[in-house]
Amino acid sequence: MALDDRSGDHEVDAPAEMIAAPIAAAEPMPAAPTRTRRQRMRGPLLIAAPIAALIFVLFVYLHGGRYETTDNAYFQSGLGAVAANVSGQVIAVEVHDNQRVKAGQVLFRIDPAPFQATVDEAEAALADARTQVSSLQANYAQGQAELKAAQDQLAYAEREAARQKALLAEGISSQAQYDQARLAAQTAAQGIETSRQKNASVAATLSGRVDGPIETQPAIKRAQAALDRARLDLSYTVVRAKQDGIVTKVDQLQVGDYVAAAKPVFTLAGTRIWIEANFKESQLDHMRIGQQATVEVDAFPDLKLTGHVVSFSPGTGNSFALLPPENATGNWVKVVQRLPVELDIDNPPADVPLHAGLSVEVTVDTGHRRHLFGSATGTPPAGR
């Protein structure tokens, strides 16, 4: 029985503990925890994001059009054809392919023997002309002396004829003596005329400069000009560089080749390097001469160059094509044109080989600005 009482007490106590637990759970709840940081930032971000996007759009708009970029750009250099001024056989080639040369440096030589012979012949012709002119001047001087003697002879003959005429009138002289004196006077007069004609012919040959310096005579000038031309042709047998640069395609010229005058034999690339950038016509609105530019070279990614706009081509590339497109057709399609723009490099590096034809990317700072209100501003036009 006691056991039953203990069991009954146990059954009564257990439900009391179980009832106490729900009562404890029913006590008032603590305050709700505060919102997380992400939840607190959500609202400001929803407001700031559109504002930032608007600011970015405004920034892009206000700065849009200031920088014009193209990768259709290449280095250019003055490529000059090397040619001889005279025809002849090559006896020596003094340079090799891709060699740097200075202005005046010998490139190749032509056999000078035929030209030296021409010089010798011209020198002989000049000496002969000098002799002929000297002889003509001497003949003219002699003719003048003969003319003076003939004039004196005429004066004497005229006096003698007058005297014989007077004596004939007095009966002292005979008619034959008078006739002889008169004939002598006529002969002296004819001698004067002959001397004058002879001297006139000599003077005409000397172009009227009968007593001037021998170097002023036309014959001497012609002979001297022929000699100068022969000497010039002889000097042309040594072909020299017209400017500093690099020679290329030299291997196609060999000793023993016969070169024709004015026919290119290889090429000399000048040392001046510039950039030809082909900008779209829609990029030229605010571009002006003198504006600064940055240049990136494909061959040297780490190299950054600066330059400036020098000039604009007078026409697009199609304008100077051998076969320009015919736009006056029924099936016409508009194509954006490109205008070549020349830029000079500021302080080109001496240790970097910038060769003609290398691709570059050019960005020109036009200084253009947009305003929210009013017209845009930019670099004042400096010509195009």
Image: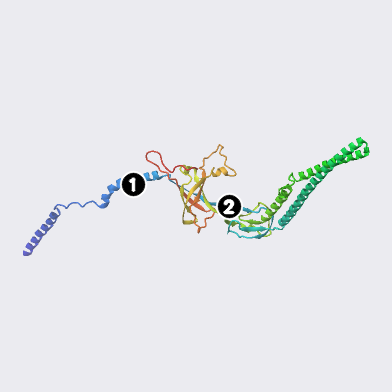
Picture coordinates of residue 76 (x, y %)? 54, 51
Q: Earlier in the sequence, mark 2 or mark 1?
A: 1
Image-based side of 124 in relation to 33, left or right: right
Residue occupied by mark 1: 52
Residue 319: tell me if it is visible: yes
Residue 293: numbered disc:
none
Select label 2 or label 1 by which is in front: 2
In which quadrant of the rendered view does residue 237 lie? Answer: bottom right
Could you tell me the amino acid type at mark 1?
Ala
At x 69% / y 52%, what residue is drawn? 228
Helix, strand or loop at disc 1?
Answer: helix
When the figure is inspected, residue 172 is found, relative to residue 229, above or below; the finding is above
Answer left or right for 53 relative to 318: left
Mark 1: few/some/many CA within 10 Å (<14, 14-19, 20+) = few
In the picture, residue 162 is in which quadrant?
Answer: top right
Q: Amino acid at mark 2?
A: Leu
Give the class, few, some or many, for how many residues have Cα within 10 Å of label 2's Cα (few <14, many ≥20). some
Residue carrying label 2? 79
Specify whether 215 is left or right of 306: right
